[in-house]
Amino acid sequence: MPAPLVFETMGTVVTLVTAVPLDPTTSDAVQDAFRELDERFSLYKPESEASLVGHGRVGIRTASAAYQEMYWAAIAWSEATDRAFTPHRPDGVIDLSGVVKARGIQAAGDVLVQHGHTDWCLNAGGDVLVAGVQETGEPWVVGIVDPDDRTAMWSQFATRPGRLAVATSGIQERGEHVWRMAADDTFTQVTVAAADIETADVLATAILAGGVTTLQLVQGKYDIDVLASAHDGRVWASPIFTSDKA
Amino acid sequence: MIGASAVAADPTSLTSDDPSASAASTSAPGTTKAATAAATSKAATTVAAAPASGLKDGTFAGPAVTHQYGSVAVSITVSGGEITSVATTTSVDSRSTSITSSAVPTLKSRVIAAQSGSISTVSGATYTSKAFISSVQSAVTKAKASSCGCTAPAYVPL
């Protein structure tokens, strides 16, 4: 298996493993897919459009079509989750990073497909999108970090058609982009597996923020598997994550 | 469960109109992609002291009534003007994943553990790049992941 491509973007690290070696053109295109979004949407770049609009220095209606499209996508997710997911932070800043990162991952995946790659595993800061299988023919297996010990592994998820994306949100993220609804702080970590990374990423964030109410809401609406841990040691798990042994 | 407190279950008169019922189990994860999982539940009942009811003898099936997770249909058997048994057939809509993949409260010990050597990559909450890297590297090391995975190789120092 070729050496993985590792690079920093969007304030995190991306790791990409492909069955077939990446040529330089494809490698550059993958990185550009993230960086184009990061240029526009980073709140850490003071002169990015996201900073200008996010802090109210430029009105949304005068923002670029790309910004508006991302904003309304986030609003749609907010509506779909009864506002457990929201781009509007309590401090008034508009923060689209919950959707932007997923779209970066998807864009990079699209680049890989366009360049003929059928088997790959892409990890951006703990959010994972895969295609195909490992070199051995085995499915890509995503380990899930232990919520009580971030240096240990807790469980795992074997990817398959319809479950190619796995995302995890934890309370450690609060300083970045997860803002809880005051009503429910049940969960400390939520993992969602879905067909696409945007659904997985947004719903993991939403369930962490909205608690059991949001978990039940989104499970009725979306085809997902969930593994969630609570402060008091309780666990919620889809059957795929559990075995019969006690 | 069908029936009020006045009816008593009678296993000997249990009826099933669905030949697939006995093999179905909606609780087994492996069946989640089956076209339709059907189960006929017990609830054969005898109603005591029914008056002349005007009911015809025979077995009568009610319509399948849909609900959030599928449908339920009830059939009754009338003998001598009395309802002698009630059987329910439930179906879980295969398009509804609400039951089959729903996360429900469970014991932490029932969550499958990461298998050494099989991990390709790691999903966890991002804190910072460096924290994530050290976390992933430690996790992979602890899990003794094989060298074929995404996270096994050394990272470029930040």
Image: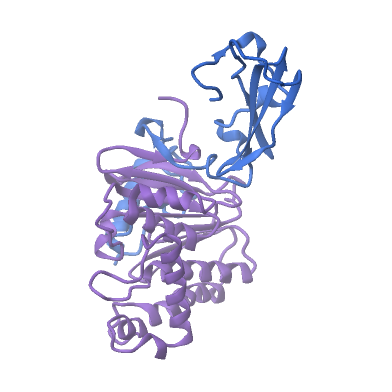
Chain colours: A purple, B blue
Q: Is residue B64 visible?
A: yes
B130 left or right of A113 in image: left
Residue B78 at x, y percent in the picture: 71, 18
Q: Quadrant of residue B29?
A: top right
In which quadrant is the C terminus of chain B drawn? Answer: bottom left
Residue A146 at x, y percent in the picture: 32, 44
Of residues B52 and A185, the one nearer the viewer is B52
A165 left or right of A114 in image: left
Q: Is residue B140 visible?
A: no
Against A74, residue A39 (above or below) is below
Residue A168 at x, y percent in the picture: 39, 54
Q: What number of labels is visible?
A: 0
Against A183, residue B92 (above or below) is above
Of residues A1 and B34, the one nearer the viewer is B34
The residue at the point 36 percent across, 71 percent down is A10
Of residues B104 and B74, the one nearer the viewer is B74
Q: Quadrant of residue A72?
A: bottom left
- Tell which residue pokes out farthest to the top in this image: B12
Of residues B131 and A46, the one nearer the viewer is A46
The residue at the point 47 percent across, 40 percent down is A238
Residue B91 at x, y percent in the picture: 64, 35
Against A175, residue B5 (above or below) is above
The residue at the point 60 percent across, 38 percent down is B32
